[in-house]
Amino acid sequence: MILASASPRRADILRSLGIPFTVAATDVPEDLLPGETAEAAARRLAAAKAARAAGRAPESWVLAADTLVSLDGATLEKPRDDTDAAAMLRRLAGREHGVVTAVHLRRGGDAGVGVAEISRVRFAPMSDAEIAWYVATGEPRDKAGAYGVQGLGARFIAEIRGSFTNVMGLPARAVYELLRGAPDPALGLLALSSG
């Protein structure tokens, strides 16, 4: 199986599940369409990443994902720079938001199948000093919503409802169900492998 992502967090989650894979990141533009919801965008982008990787390796199964943060109907992508990261964190501080990760599985020219998981995350209030410290660590730079739940950002998370691995970028249970439900019996066995 190919993981169509350069995310070390997604790779770590697959490894923790004992699922063997190789990494082949794609270069799909991650621009949002006008009026597109976070869930619709994540589904579209995950499917596009899977299609791109499947085109390069048509005999292999491809797993792709995309994660976005939603707050008050607005979609928060990866921050453009540290100033943007700080602004995102100010918006999230003391509030609850949604994290959607869409996952898509396909092989070759088949359209494949996808699923989207949504978790709810509540941030504790954050002072300007805390925001400045966290931004200076560099951790927010490559993460949707400008934080990493599995890293230094964990100290600011007050509550998570739903899948923790979804907030990290790959919902473990959803991946397992996609593999178990795939038309290829080998994927079902892969889902139950231990590496």
Image (cartoon, rainbow, N blue to C red):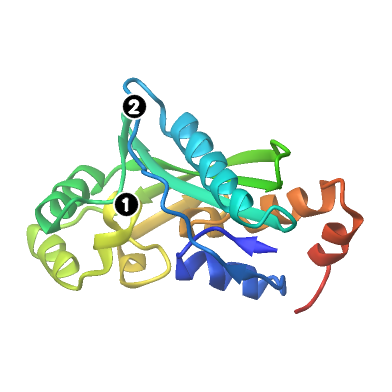
Q: CB under 8 Å between callouts 1 and 2?
A: no
- Is 175 placed above or below 15 here? above
Please state the horizontal and vertical placement of residue 35, each as a whole percent of the image: 34, 20
Which residue reaches farthest right?
A: 185
Neighbour tally class for label 2: few under 14, some 14-19, many 20 plus, Cα within 10 Å: few
**Which residue appears at 70% of the width and 63% of the height?**
1
User: For numbered disc 1, what is the local secondary structure?
Assistant: strand
Q: Which mark identifies residue 114?
A: none
Q: Is residue 181 left or right of residue 78?
A: right
Please state the horizontal and vertical placement of residue 36, each as a whole percent of the image: 39, 24
Q: Which mark identifies residue 73?
A: 2
Amino acid residing under circle 2 = Gly
**Which residue appears at 27% of the width and 68% of the height?**
139
Q: Is residue 124 left or right of residue 137?
A: right
Task: Please tell me which residue lies in front, 96 or 144.
Answer: 144
Q: Which residue is mark 1?
A: 123
Q: Earlier in the sequence, mark 1 or mark 2?
A: 2
What quarter of the picture does the C terminus occupy?
A: bottom right
**Which residue appears at 41% of the width and 27% of the height?**
37
Please state the horizontal and vertical placement of residue 9, each as a whole percent of the image: 48, 68
Task: Please tell me which residue lies in front, 154 or 143.
Answer: 143
**Which residue appears at 77% of the width and 54% of the height?**
179
User: For numbered disc 2, what is the local secondary structure?
Assistant: loop
Q: Is residue 39 left or right of residue 172?
A: left
